[in-house]
Image (tube, rainbow, N blue to C red):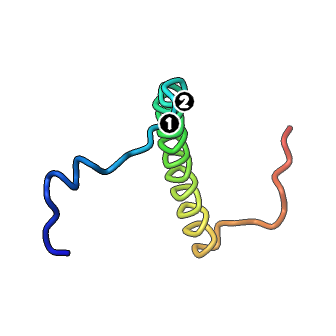
Amino acid sequence: MKNISQEKVLSIRVELSPRPLQQTFAPRIEVIGALKASHRSALSALDALFVALQQRAFAGQLSIHPRRSG
């Protein structure tokens, strides 16, 4: 079917969710977006720490003995 008439398009029934459900959807998506941004930021920080750890490891600057405080 190459073309579809306007009449056929307008005759298509589209089911909608109940209005209360629609109204709760947008805020949930915003919260999810904020969580994704937070996780991306945390992942970026972890990547930077891992790179620093690798650099120290390959430079021989890591010790297997923990430092003692005091």
Mark 2 surroundings: few (<14), some (14-19) or many (≥20) residues within 10 A: few
| SS for callout 2 | helix
Q: Are the residues flagged by discs 2 and 1 in contact, CB closer than 8 Å?
A: yes
Q: In which quarter of the image is the N terminus?
A: bottom left
Q: Nearer the viewer, residue 19 or 30?
A: 19
Residue located 14% across and 52% down the image: 6
Above-or-below relation of 17 to 48: above
**Circle 1 residue:** 17
* Amino acid type at mark 2: Leu
Q: In which quarter of the image is the C terminus?
A: top right
Checking the image for residue 4, the label placed there is none
Locate residue 35 relative to residue 60 in the image: left or right.
left
Residue 69 in the image: x percent, y percent? 84, 41
Q: Nearer the viewer, residue 70 or 63?
A: 63
| SS for callout 1 | loop
**Circle 2 residue:** 21
Residue located 61% across and 63% down the image: 53
Residue 52 in the image: x percent, y percent? 55, 60
